[in-house]
Amino acid sequence: MPHTAEWKVRLYLFEDEGTTKARVVLDTGSTSLTGHGVAHRNPADTDVPEIGDELAAGRALHDLGQRLVDAAARDIDGMGASVTRREPPQVTGWPV
């Protein structure tokens, strides 16, 4: 039973005074999901917008991925099957 689908993803970045915000929207054709991410530059750090873009976009994509997995888990639950949920790994590094 072959299946082919095309989903569209749009990523929006907004930067203002050391804070970069990202919004990513997944359009499956029948539904849409949105993920968000934020990165804050330390005022003492050099202003490199690409780094803020990368962090905020990565965090938005991670948020979207989690929302997509959660939607799949709800769909599985709705079919009466059980879902094994795992806790996300501990993340270190730049603050959110």
Image (spheres, helix red, strand yellow):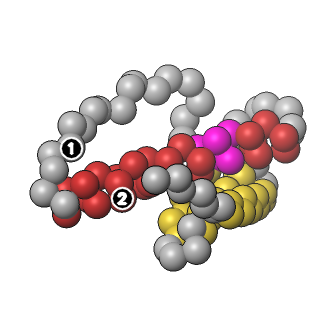
The amino acid type found where label 2 is placed reads: Ala
Label ID, residue 22: none
Residue 94 drawn at (x, y percent)? 59, 30
Label ID, residue 71: 2
* Crowd class of label 2 (few under 14; some 14 to 19; many from 20; radius 10 Å): few
Does residue 59 appear left or right of residue 10 in this picture? left
Compared to 84, does 80 lie above or below?
A: below
Compared to 94, does 34 lie above or below?
A: below
Mainly helix, strand or loop, the magenta region? helix
Precedes in sequence: disc 2 or disc 1? 2
Residue at 57% x, 67% y: name it: 28
Q: Which contiguous range is marked in magenta?
A: 55-59
Compared to 92, does 60 lie above or below?
A: below
Q: Distance between the residues labelled 2 and 1?
A: 12 Å
Looking at the figure, which quarter contains the C terminus? Answer: top right
The amino acid type found where label 1 is placed reads: Val
Residue 39 visible within the image = no
Residue at 36% x, 58% y: name it: 71
Does residue 11 appear left or right of residue 71 in this picture? right
Residue at 64% x, 41% y: name it: 58
Residue 32 drawn at (x, y percent)? 53, 71
Residue 70 drawn at (x, y percent)? 34, 53
On the image, numbered disc 1 is attached to which residue? 83
